[in-house]
Image: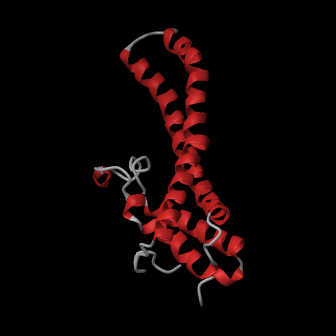
Amino acid sequence: MPSLKSAPRNTSGMADRVFWYQLHVFQICVWVFCTLPCLALVIYFFPKLAVFFAGGPQRSSMAVIKVVVIAVPIVLLFVALLYLALLLGAVLNVLVVRVLIRELRVPEARSLLLQFYSDPRWLYQHPGTKNFPWWISLWGGMGKNPRLNRWAATLTAGMISLVYGADSRPPA
């Protein structure tokens, strides 16, 4: 796959519309497939956790073990759901753009949809996230997670070929 950062950025009104649709699809996917299920799990398990922490010896080492036993799987589940939500967003954003922006045609669709992954507004959505490690920057932008950004761009490129047809593939 060619480097996404080397292409000059298209700043037309159409490119801006495509960017905002893509960004909103990603944000909706994160909310629906990651944040809300995690909140539901926390609410569901909260009474059970209160009982778990109330019983047994209450030494500091046991409290640390209990927190690790509970917190680590919850954090890993949240990160896994976030990865899956972002990858699903990469697939859905092509479909949404195809349905909502009918005037976007094959030649420019590929470049407009793929320039999203090198856009600073996507890479660093919130001020200050450039200094966070990659695993925290998931919530503030994709700038320090190039692997996930590359996976999402690859999925988007595949969906472009599928949705817009074989003519949208880059020349070999």
Q: Is residue 11 left or right of residue 36?
A: left
Rendering quarter of residue 12: bottom left
- Residue at 68% over, 74% down: 164
Tell me which corner region of the image, top left, top right, bottom left or bottom right, holds residue 113. Answer: bottom right
Horizontal side, residue 28 vs residue 116: left or right: right
Q: Residue at x 54, y 18 (%)?
A: 49
In the image, residue 103 lies at what x, y percent? 62, 72
Quadrant where the image shows the C terminus:
bottom right
Number of residue marks:
0
User: At 58% from the left edge and 60% from the top edge, which residue is drawn?
Assistant: 90
- The residue lying toward the viewer, choosing from 57 and 112, is 112
Q: Quadrant of residue 87?
A: bottom right
Counting from the top left corner in percent of width and height, residue 44 is at 61, 22
Residue projecting furthest to the bottom: 172
Q: Tell me if residue 4 comes above or below residue 64 in the rendering.
A: below
Q: How is the image coloured?
A: secondary structure
- The answer to whether residue 58 is above or below residue 80 is above
Q: Position of residue 11 (x, y in %)?
A: 41, 72
- Image x and y of residue 76, in percent: 52, 41
Q: Residue at x 51, y 70 (%)?
A: 14
Closer to the camera, 56 or 115? 115
